[in-house]
Amino acid sequence: MGWKLLLTLVVTLASVLSVFGAPSTSLGLGNQSTEKYVFAHFMVGIVANYELEDWKVDMAAAQSTGIDAFALNCASIDKYTPTQLALAYKAAAEIGFKVFISFDFAYWNNGDTAQITAYMQQYAAHPAQMQYKGAAVVSTFVGDSFNWDPVKQGTSHPIYALPNLQDPAEATTIASKSADGAFSWLAWPTDGGNSIIPGPMTTIWDDRFFHFLEGRTYMASVSPWFSTHFNTKNWVFICENLPTLRWEQMLSLKPDLVEIISWNDYGESHYIGPSEPNHSDDGSSQWVTNMPHDAWRELYKPYIAAYKSGASAPTVEEDKLVYWYRPTPKGVVCTGDSLGAPNGISMLSDSIFVATMLTSPATLTVRSGNNSPVSINVPAGITTSNVTMGVGDQRFTLTRGGQTILSGQGGLTVQDHCTHYNFNVYVGSISRGS
């Protein structure tokens, strides 16, 4: 049996066991003596027109969530990359934020050592550069076989290379050993490629990174969603409870660093930043327009604080709920879409998801469309529940001791018709007085 097939079976078995409540064996734990940081992946390639204030607005929103730095994904072919990197570093320095470069090896290659070294020489000692263990952080998207030794030798300030490895076993290669650790892009249920497997997410890939890195730094990835609908890229991953599940895994595993995928990758629907208008459109506006994800930052904030403090659970200081759901049931046929439905949607459930953030136990009641109301007793802390999706308005109520403590309607009406397929989610929140 081939290695890839065997691994696929192992991943699938882990997912099946997780469904039935079997725990995922975790190798954890990260370096407990080193300060923890949380980053967010930022796509520079779509902000050619950004000005200094645009950067500051995004960075301030990230700071208020507990995010320490943006990983600036940049391509070699974009003429505006130098300009936008300079603006990003300037903005970060002015508001006390940090940034670092993430070289996107869909565009860079192993022959670009001189240009990569030049960027690192320019920014490694910058006041806004993210430093870790006394060295300037640098990362990648793919770029598994790039040799970091010449870059380190050509940069006067120490650098700390955390490249994205597509396969954790690559951490044992000569090229990877020139790095100081690795970053995982495996933030969704997957067999290690782009194959779609049933959820929920397990920690099997994290465990493999811990194993093969042998004590070197592991930067784990967290992502709330994945849905894309391009001509050559048309699928979903099964992420329905991922916004909280993945953070619960981080609190258990305690990896050295965490990077959120993403701040502004609208094309893959996993953005947690604002859907600001000042970015280029690659066609993703079709499924992003009027589909905010800002409330996920409210949900992430207590998890980030817990991760940084080493706590095993987040602390909730205010009663609130965060909800997310799709615009249509999965079986609806869209009438004007030439691409067809995304791959993998048969594994999705038609559900409304609600994360309750409670200071003490309460009862959540959801009325989805014309369905009968469903009431769920939920404990203090953060708990994700789901109810069957109904076409129509979505209403949410929290009661405690017979008294309503908050109530509201979802910001999107679920419909039984569509022109274009959209498996992105609307994310909103309800709190006292909202």
Image (spheres, rainbow, N blue to C red):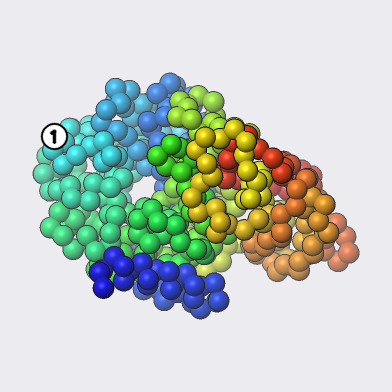
Report which residue position mark 1 lands on: 114
Image coordinates for residue 305, horizontal then vertical, percent:
52, 56
Q: Is residue 237 above or below residue 271?
A: below
Would you say residue 331 is visible in this rendering?
A: yes
Quadrant where the C terminus lies? top right
Q: Position of residue 186 (x, y in %)?
A: 38, 56
In the image, residue 116 above or below residue 308: above
Q: Residues within 10 Å of mark 1 (few under 14, many from 20)?
A: few
Q: Is residue 398 left or right of residue 295?
A: right
Q: Nearer the viewer, residue 169 or 32?
A: 169
Residue at 63% from the left image edge and 43% from the top image edge: 333
Q: Which quadrant holds residue 182? A: bottom left
For image coordinates 56% across by 66% down, the residue present is: 313
Q: Relative to 423, does residue 363 appear above or below in the rendering?
A: below
Query: On the rendered structure, is 269 left or right of 143?
Result: right
Q: Position of residue 266 (x, y in %)?
A: 49, 37
Which residue corresponds to the image point at 65% horizontal and 55% vertical from the top-left? 350
Relative to 344, say whether 413 is above or below.
above
Amino acid type of the residue tagged 1 in the rendering: Ala
Q: Secondary structure at mark 1?
A: helix
- Nearest the viewer among 42 and 394 is 394
Residue 5: x and y in percent read: 31, 67
| Image quadrant assignment for residue 25 | bottom left
Q: Quick check: 100 left or right of 234? A: left
Instruction: Look at the image and tell me whether residue 258 can be seen.
Output: no
Q: For the N terminus, give its image quadrant.
A: bottom left
